[in-house]
Every structure is written in C-alpha cells, then in structure tokens.
Image (spheres, rainbow, N blue to C red):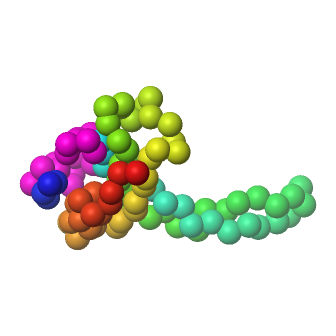
Amino acid sequence: MIQRKDLLALNFYKKLPFHGSDGPKRYRVEKFVQKVTETVKNEETGEEEEKVLEEIPCLKATLWPGPMNFETTPDEQKKTHLEEFSEAGMQAIVDWLNATPLE
C-alpha cells in the first residue's frame, strides 16, 4: 500500500517526475501544466488559433502494470489521473493509486 510518506516533498515535483512501485503496480507522479484555451480568430490572417487563457499547475499520476517501465509500456495499458498541485492533491493521488485496480 502506498502512503504519502513514500512520495517525495512537493517541491521535488517542480523539476522532476518520481517513479515508484507497489507489488505489480508501477507509477509515475509528475508536475503537469493544464492549459485553459479558447479559439480566437487572428485579425491579420483571418485564421483561427488557440489562445492560452490560463496555465494551471497540477499533479499527474500515471499507473501501469509491471514489470515494464514507463517508456516501454504501451499507452493503452496506462491510466492517468490529475489533481491540484498541493498537499491535498498529493494525498488524493495516493488515494487514487491505492484504489485503482490493474486490468
């Protein structure tokens, strides 16, 4: 069972992802910036383009079955979950990792 103390301090995730395992489960926790966008028309070219309105820092957890590593596991076998970039978000990530079964 994964506990909050098993994952590193929140500041670590500002620069690097963290990889871990729990039995047959493999997981990765990282900072992810979610972009809120809207489609606007460029007045000069008349073409539509995406404008970033806001960038929201999040924690992203990815879960997959072992023994494969993150890079070699097909995306179809991975499950992901986003939470806010905070201690409460980190605890929610821990809860999700523990509650999510491998298929």
Give the camera-side residue of 48 and 81.
81
How many numbered badges does the structure rendering display? 0
Q: Whole-percent x and y of residue 72?
A: 44, 29
- Residue 30 in view here: no
Residue 97 lies in what quarter of the image?
Answer: bottom left
- Residue 27 in view here: yes
Most extreme residue toward the left is 5
Q: Residue at x 70, y 60 (%)?
A: 50
Q: Which residues are magenta?
A: 5-25
Quarter of the image that includes the N terminus:
bottom left
Give the camera-side residue of 78 and 93.
78
Most extreme residue toward the front is 103
Q: Whole-percent x and y of residue 91?
A: 21, 65
| Left or right of 34 on screen, residue 81 | left
Residue 33 lies in what quarter of the image?
Answer: bottom left
Q: Residue at x 52, y 67 (%)?
A: 54
Give the camera-side residue of 1 and 90.
1
Residue 84 lies in what quarter of the image?
Answer: bottom left
Residue 23 is a magenta residue:
yes
Q: Residue at x 19, y 45 (%)?
A: 22
